[in-house]
Amino acid sequence: MKIQFENITKTFGSVVANDLVSFQIESGTIHAIIGENGAGKSTLVKILAGLSTPDSGEMYVNGKIVELGSVSESQAVGIGILGQEPWDFANLTVIESFIVGSKHNTPFMDYQKLRKTVGHYCKNYGLRINVDTQVKNLSIGERQQIELFRLLFNGSQVIILDEPTSAFSLDQKKLIFDTLKRLAANGYSIVLVSHKIDEVLEICSRATVMRGGKVVDTLNLPVPSSKLIDLMFGVNNDRSFNKNRNMPSNQFLNISSIARADKRHNRFKDVPEGCILGIAGLQGSGADGFVKSIFDTDAYKVSITRETEKKDFLDNQRNVTYLPADRLEKGLFSDLSVLEHFALAKSHGNTLIDWSQVKDDALSLVQEFDIKGETDSKASHLSGGNQQRLMLSLIDKDTEILLMEQPTRGLDVLSAKFVWDKLVESKKNKVLTVFSSHDIDEICMYSDYIICFHGDDISGYGSNLELSRLDVMNLISGRFQDDS
Amino acid sequence: MIPDIKSILANIISMLIVFLVISMFLLIIGSSPIEVYLALIDGAFGNTDRFARTLLTTAILCISAFALVVTFTGGLWNIGIEGQLVAGSIGTTVIARSFIGESVAAPIFEIMIGSLFGSLIAVFCGILKAKANVHEIFGGLGLDFVASGAIVYLVIGPWKREGIASTSGTDIFPENAWIQSIGEYGVPIWPIIFAVVIGISLLLCFKRTTFGLRLKAVGSNAAASQRFGIEPSRYLLYAFALAGGIGGIAGVVQAAVVYHKLVPFISGGYGFLGILIALISSKNLVLVVLVSTVFGCLLIGGTQLQLKLGMHSSLSGIIQGLLVLTWILIKASKVDHRLTNKLAVWSKFGQY
């Protein structure tokens, strides 16, 4: 089936997720849609699946116009979507999950026939499972496979896979990829959404690259991976912004980490004291978890020591401040007022609250951090930028290590700049700032030292003088070893 | 000030709607709403004796709802409140039946031990949650059954009356162990003082102390409170201890003021009613007093419906249920706020 997008535009408030997107997906191909996080890939496939309605534009299937924003219409023309997580029912058996949502539904199901059909799919595509087992007993890969069969069973001609492999083992990935190749050979169209270039090069025959909501190019594969990277991230891979930056200190820290999962050990030597340490990684990578682990030792056991002394900074939790990415879910109290937040932060050791004192302190901090909003308005009523300013203003003065997950997530340009000005300023007080980000520009612009994550693994690290923007891009997309 | 006026107005509108709904219900079942309301008012305030009983019931409801405000503030569902009331009255009886019961200091010990018993059973529920991850609703409900089982055992077992074992209760306490009322009609001065002291203390606790603010913080977002150096599970136990202690005092009042003995159904369901009151008042201590008064009137005034109008005694319960449901529906649908905003628009038109 041939699918054609014509000038699809979708905006969320002031954010343009899809900007006049036009391209074609040919039948019998595996077509990749690639791009950075936030490039607009997921929005586009949601429109394709009828899960989202665009503001304007048209979509044609085999030359016929399709009503947009209707799941049933998309299903009727044969479009099926496989999510990042399996959308199934963990407590049902494989057979039962076929019955639920089946197009061929009758009051009484012919179990024998269905069993045969499911068995046929499994045999055909090399999946060895017991069809009477509960879905929850299967691996994620097997569940995705079953979901795929269910789409085929319901007559889907176009299968969309929205970054399906993030939770797969290598074997599972191979199984799914083999299935996809065979389906394409049989005339099905496969749309693979991904930001993993190696995957795309492995199985796709065409790729559409998106950046900032726009289609940058649609090209036939294979091409060198560096070309795809350039298209994905833009071509200004220069080091100019790294120049003229002095190392903040001649004192150095030793940082080491041990992954809980595979006991892999990493040592980052010569990290300057009072610097900004950037943890780079794409969405879903271990970067955020690494930052959080420094606070709660969940996924990694991290230790940070000065070169000259043995004492681990992290032994004294008091000097560590952790600012999570989910500001309202994990960082602030949505029901408490700004003033109450200040009272909480400064309340150590006092029984009574001196509200007039708290108010005085709060007013000066509100001014210093330019928090827009009344001091008695609830945290949930503040904008994202003001919430982040509030979080920054609450940081204890004794903080030596500041941990931030995606410090500028969802912030407007001005707030983001404000946050970074504050963080850079804190270098003077020898605060070690560790932050994670999906934004390569942010990583390269502000980090003195960079640790790169590809998936859950640390793929490389070094000071900002040793690593270029291109190096970081390669490291987080997992292409470094092959090219060098 | 303006948002305050608006929310007060919204509450007045809500009350009017509730009134309307109850009146319509009464019309549908073929009775005159005015007669019913008059009977209720007469039943609650008609003479000094009834007035005193209404005050007493209101005070007990207030105390039990205050206990629940504490746990709700900490983000906890203290379904175990009934058990805490029962534990409080068992504690009272322990003192009243001991040698202390004959002394004039008995009430002081009853309050202390009753409060302690309530606190202990509540903390047990808290430990189950903190250490064994048993949700406080299940733990609390289980402990409610334990407490009501224990009280029946005590009444017909070790504490049975001379010669007979009856569920009608233990022997009457010695008079020194009663918490006395004032005057011929028994104005319940002490329960009112308890309620006032507890209410004001809690108000101060939440407005002025670090403890109150931290409890609020834990209830609002346990994950974030850890970032502020607060240990949520510790505050969970504090909340239970405090709420149980207050609930225990409601039990003390039931045993030492109302019954002067231990009876199997000593809680009178006031614990569960307290949950409703705390919910309707949305943790606002002043509103708790108002709502408790309404429920106190309905409970005591309701008896007159049967005597005076020959209506079934369950009617009072139905009115209470309607009140709660309508109120919750109004608040959930935000009808009151929409009407208030409309009213504000209209009043602006009037100015031109």
Image: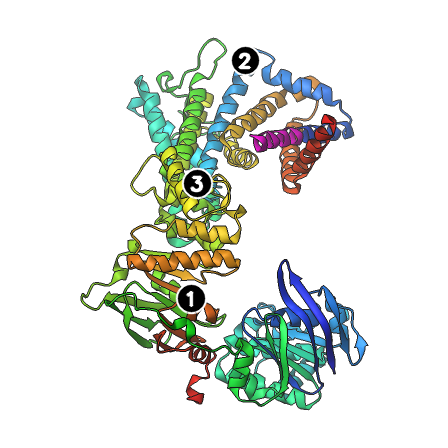
**Is residue B2 covered in magenta?**
yes
Q: Amino acid at mark 1?
A: Ser
Identify residue for label 1: A436
Crowdedness of circle 3 by 10 Å Cα count: few (<14), some, many (20+)? many
Amino acid bearing label 3: Leu
Please give the name of the residue rendered at 40% of the width and 49% of the height, measured from the top-left corner: A393
Of badges 1 and 2, nearer the viewer stands: 1
- Residue underneath mark 2: B49
Callout 1 crowding tier (Cα within 10 Å): few <14, some 14–19, many ≥20 = many
Query: With respect to residue A331, does B295 lie above or below?
Result: above
**Number of disc labels:** 3
Q: Main secondary structure of the magenta part?
A: helix
Q: Are marks 1 and 2 on the same chain?
A: no
Residue B280 place in picture, x, y as percent: 57, 35
Instruction: Tell me how far mark 2 sits from mark 3, CA to CA.
Output: 48 Å
Instruction: Tell whether position B21 is magenta.
Output: no
Q: Quadrant of the N terminus of chain A?
A: bottom right
Q: CA distance from mark 1 to mark 2?
A: 70 Å
Which residue appears farthest toward the left when viewing the image?
A309
Q: Which residues are magenta?
A: B1-15
